[in-house]
Image (cartoon, coloured by chain):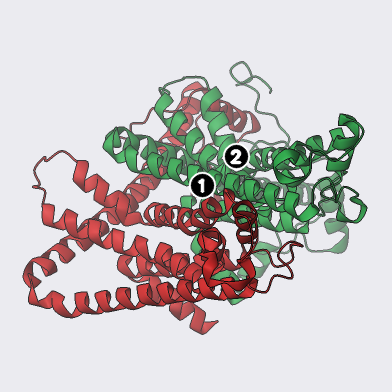
Chain colours: A red, B green
Amino acid sequence: MDRFRMIFQYFQSSSESVMNGICGLLALASVKMYTCFDFSCPCLPQYNRAYGLGIMFIPPIILFLCGLILNRQSLVMLDEWRRPQGHRKKDLAVIRYMCSSIMQRAMVAPVVWIIVTLLDGKCLICAFSGSMDPEKFVGFANVTPVQLEQLLAKVPCKDDELIRNNTSRKAVSRYLRCWSQALGWSILLILIVAAFLARWLRPCFNQDTLLQARHWSNYIDMEQKIFEETCCEHSRLFAHKCILHFFESMQQEIKLHRFTLPRQGEGDEGEEDLRGITDQDQVNKLLKTWYYEKPPLDVS
Amino acid sequence: MDKFRMIFQFFQSNQESFMNGICGIMALASTQMYSAFDFNCPCLPHYNMAYGLGILLVPPFILFLLGFVLNNNISMLAEEWRRPRGQRGKDPAVLRYMFCSMAQRAMIAPAVWVSVTLLDGKCITCAFCTSVPVETLGNASHPLLSQGEIQRVLARIPCKEIYNGQELIANEVAVRYLRCISQALGWCFVLLMTTLAFLVRSLRPCFSQAAFLKSRYWSHYIDIERKLFDETCAEHARSFAKVCIQQFFEGMSTDLVAGRCHLPRKASADTGEASKKLLGITDQGTMNMALKSWHRCKPPLHLHPPALPSGNGLAGEGQPSVHPSAPRRETAAYYSLV
């Protein structure tokens, strides 16, 4: 529990950490979604490619949009971009920095999905089994084109009666899976090399502009958060004052209509809290007035 | 337990986090409900579609309503909408903001149910198995009797054990076809929802950001004000009850003093604190009488000003009213009995 709390606190400590945390959670969610998803290739000539490529590319778009939505900083950036100039100049470098950092973080989960898909291989087998060259595989040699199309489309479905006993089914499957995994590993390698180079070579270019942009983007984020917290604090105090004024005005009304003044004795400690409202009728009147005539929003 | 408490505290820390937490819990509850639900397709021609579409559409509606019910702010919204104008104007923008934010949160659990249902595929398979294109997927030329008979056979597709139309169309082929369509619909639905959410969230700062900030501030204000008012009333009720009960005991004690033949021995100064708390009731008989009187004849909800401390325990002169049940009704003309 302690470890969990420490990790949780670490991620809460700064807004960048929070965003990295969300990014990591989305990546894990994408892997989990893939394993939970029940991939079932339709094994029909016209549908295979659409299904396979759809499963490979639509969820990444969804994950990308989710990454943008869940990231608080995207709202801050949009706000900063669209605000009127006012007394504070707009610095495009800061906006560009924020935009690029948001995009980078949002791209992690889609890339994870695509790589996991490729390494698993089912999508590519489903999508491209129909475009195999029958010459390479013995089992499809003496078959009419129409039947060939049907047979090739059924390769991803192992238990189908047409393809169950075909000798080249496994061969096609293995061939496509090999390509799929090779593509997956290559993409992973290229991305890691690109990230490595970007991180190593970045200090060589515009380091000072970068430091400035990063500082001011953190500042804008922090300022927004503190503004919201201050507004909450303010509205709490405002409400407190408003209610106190309301109780006092009730007390004055009561005093105005009473023939005898209440004794201002030393009283017990409960007396101050009663604020002069000491009767069932008075309490009922107070509650009724609260509903029918809320006090104006003015505590001057 | 500790982890649970920490997560709980994090979500309680502010109102919006709390609402987001409820929203997330409902989304998880909806996936759990779906996996716990035992889907049982009837496999009869006209019942299939009703059952399948019913399972697809009725629980989301229930979850949507539940999302509103579980949201505390609904009563706040209703109250703000229906209250008389009084001295404070009503701002429709604030009402719209509150309603929109509640509706957005309530939409998440139904959307999760619909997505999970479509991605799983059982509902669509059940609902549309009679509309499978037999010509393209199977042998339409199979000499079967009538359209009705074909419908009956196709309706049994989801129930593999009783399916008898293997020559008409293979069960796996049909199921795979329907499931592919269902999953495509599911992913498109999720994409559409996500795109809508993205557009709503990103277009808002481009238009009317200032109005949005205003509405958000005042809707938080209304919520905080309501809570503070409830707290103040609770505090007031507490003090009211305390003074009422104290006056009751004082009244009892004064009655006893007035009815006794001899003066009670005044407690010495050293036992001051404890004997003050005894409120003048120092034996079993008196206590029993006080309890009986509390049950039979509760004091009126009317606190009279505190009696001056009298030096010798006698019902002193110069006190405005000693008898607790004397009604102060000279102000009856102003306050009506509610």
Left or right of B61 in this view: B101: left
Say what secondary structure mark 2 lies in.
Answer: loop
- Nearest the viewer among A164 and B20 is A164
- What is the number of the mark on residue A50? none
Query: Residue A41: percent from the left, percent from the top?
Result: 62, 58
Please state if B98 lies on the left or on the right of B107 as rendered: left
Query: In this picture, is A221 found above or below A25?
Result: above
Q: Position of residue B151 (x, y in %)?
A: 85, 35
Instruction: Provide the chain ID for the residue under circle 1.
Output: A
State the residue in front, A49 or B204.
A49
Residue at horizontal 74 percent and vertical 62 percent from the top: A160
**Residue occupied by mark 2:** B319
Image location of residue A25, percent across then percent down:
47, 68
Q: Is residue B13 visible?
A: no
- Disc 2 residue crowd, few under 14, some 14–19, many 20+, Cα 10 Å: few
Q: Position of residue A267 (x, y in %)?
A: 52, 49
Report the amino acid beneath label 2: Gln
Badge 1, how many Cα within 10 Å: few under 14, some, many 20+?
A: some
Residue B267 image-quadrant placement: bottom right
In the shown orientation, is residue A200 left or right of residue B305? left
Tell me which residue sits at (63%, 46%) in the image.
Answer: B181
- Which quarter of the rendered picture does the N terminus of chain B lie within? bottom right
Q: Secondary structure at mark 1?
A: helix
Q: Is residue A84 above or below residue A52?
A: above
The residue under the point 59% across, 75% down is A171
Q: Which residue is mark 1?
A: A273
